Image (tube, coloured by chain):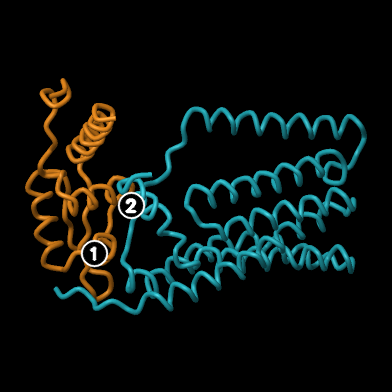
Chain colours: A cyan, B orange
Amino acid sequence: MNEIERTQQRTRGYWYSDGITELVGGVALALVGLPMIVASRTGIDALSTIALIGMIVLFPLSARAIRYLKDRITHQRTGYVKYPRPSMSTQRKALLVILFAVVGIVIIISFWRGESVLEGTFGKAFLLGSGGAMSVAFAVRAVRMRLPRFFASAAAAAAATLVTLLTGIEFNEGLGLLLALLGVTSIITGAYALSVYLGRHPKAPAETP
Amino acid sequence: MTEFEFAADPDRVIHEPARLKLMAVLSVAESADFTYLMGETGLTRGNLSVQLTRLSDAGYIEIAKEFVGRSPRTTASMTRKGRAAFDEYRTYLAGLLKATS
């Protein structure tokens, strides 16, 4: 890799250099995942509703929190980088269409076999697909951005998926386990990255008008 | 002398290492501010300002000033002309490596 590519890679990975995205995202995931597990274990359905509401409310809120924290911490220390909006290639669009088609087919098969959609083939396929996809996405990010801590998130997603499939726990608990384990791992790696970042980068003097 | 040496001449504006680094940063970002560019290039405030002006004069980047709260923020972004010049420069480098290997 030459110096131009190294510079480009550092700039692409700058968004993750402070660990804020993982930390905030991890809190949101854990707050959604943990009530799902507790609801499945205790039978308190209200917790599942709380998790669902949390999913709707927490993710937009966490995006705001990330922006706020980056403005207060990162931009004042190492500067601001605005990234271009990712454009979806035709290949990715085709992949998404195939994915939706597969999900549709799985739902039809589940109904045809008389299974409950979430507890049957679809539930297992959904958890395997989403857990596997998350694991691969984190591993790819770790390699591309040269940020090995994302391998921990990849391992967490893979572990949660395997446990769910091997122990045969119900869908809600499986999904809760996936989100909670990923959330807790992200909190740990994000907090570590943030502490390293803060130690390395004191606040830079502000620009003068 | 190889055929390559007759055919190509590097873009002198981009060829300078500090400006090349600035172009490399801006090629993957929509825009970046003065603080980030200083950290990435290791240039002093004054030198960075000179290099950005040189790139701006060539039409390769655009410089914008804005206020975030009460603090001013100067950002640079690559123009279409700059992107084309940067791509051409990378092709030149690849050709150079091929010709000399």
The residue under the point 45% across, 67% down is A18
Mark 1 residue element: loop
User: Alpha-carbon neighbours of circle 1 within 10 Å: few (<14), some, or many (≥20)?
Assistant: few
Q: In the displayed orientation, state which residue is furthest to the top.
A: B3
| Whether residue A204 is situated above or below residue B32 in the rendered picture | below
x%, y% of residue A59? 57, 61
- Residue that badge 2 annotates: A7
Query: Numbered disc 2: what chain?
Result: A
- Residue B42 image label: 1
x%, y% of residue A177? 77, 60
Please state, as top left, top right, bottom left or bottom right, where the N terminus of chain A lies in the image. Answer: top left
Amino acid type assigned to the residue bearing label 1 in the image:
Gly
Q: In the drawing, does residue A50 fall left or right of residue B82?
A: right
The residue under the point 70% across, 59% down is A179
Mark 2 residue element: helix
Q: Indicate the quadrant where residue A136 lies.
A: top right
Q: In the drawing, does residue A5 fall left or right of residue B92?
A: right
User: Alpha-carbon neighbours of circle 2 within 10 Å: few (<14), some, or many (≥20)?
Assistant: many
Query: Numbered disc 1: what chain?
Result: B
